[in-house]
Amino acid sequence: MSLSSTTQGFLKEVESSTGLRVVVEEDPRLQAPLLAKVQVARRGIPFHRVAYHPSAQGMADYLVCYQCAFVIRLHNLPAAERFDLTDNPVAQEECLAWAKAHPVSASLPTDRQAGFAEFLRSSLMSMVRSVPVGLWVDLDLRSRFPELKMAQEQAIRRQIDIQAQILNPTVRQNIPAPALRANAALNAAFAKVWARELNEPGWSLPYLVDGSATAGDALLELQESLLPIPSNDRRLIQAWADHLGFGHWLRWTPYSP
């Protein structure tokens, strides 16, 4: 697929900022709901790689720009301020304790309990890493590149629908309460921003009904207290994780090129 002039210009911006080219390609191996991902050039890889699923071709320009924005944010930081985010062993331990205490998963075999705990851990870590900074990225793209709005809105609507699955009673009863609260708060914050931006008030209503809107609002207050600049990305992620009760999971290590 040929990318638009807007996207081509943004790729040049990445290359100018980082000194390395960007390779864009389709990847049918991406697993739903993931539509695209970026691999930053490091550890001997001489280029940045952005991959998107072939089914998302209609959104490819937006998805490529969105992923590339994270590369620019990283490289706009002084080297001493760049960090990798991982987690501590306590994250898996606590998620396993949640699984063992939850009625639905308490009777699972040991290996399935461990797998479920890993799913909870990786899901929450992925969300807290991507949602808060992703909101800053998305709103910036929306302001700078109006021509991406239609594709962006398509992707946002898809994400809202996927996140709303957490509101399904069957899904809710299968998730331990601490993980459910954190997940719903993250979704509520995301839904509120886009309900306001796209004039879709119905997106926030389910989170008002289930009581998670208050927690989502608190996350957005933390976000609004910070300027949306790359040097605040780490601070924002940590603040959200702290508020959600798993900030002690996060382990920040110096970034190694």
Image: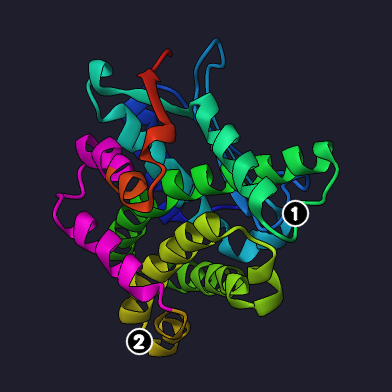
Q: Specify the segment rendered in magenta.
A: 211-238
Q: At x 39% / y 83%, what residue is drawn?
A: 208
Residue, disc 1: 105
- Residue type (three-letter) at the residue carrying disc 2: Asn
251 is within the stretch colored magenta? no
Residue 22 x %, y %: 51, 32
For residue 12, say whether it is visible: no
When the figure is inspected, residue 97 is found, relative to residue 219, above or below; the finding is above
Kindly report the distance in space between the C-alpha atoms of the residues bearing marks 2 and 1. 39 Å
Say which element carries label 1. loop
When the figure is inspected, residue 190 is found, relative to residue 119, above or below; the finding is below
224 is within the stretch colored magenta? yes
Q: At x 75% / y 60%, what residue is drawn?
A: 104
N-terminal-most mark, 2 or 1: 1
Residue, disc 2: 199
The residue positioned farthest toward the right in the image shown: 109
Q: Which of 41 and 231 is in front in this view?
A: 231
Q: At x 75% / y 51%, what residue is drawn?
A: 106
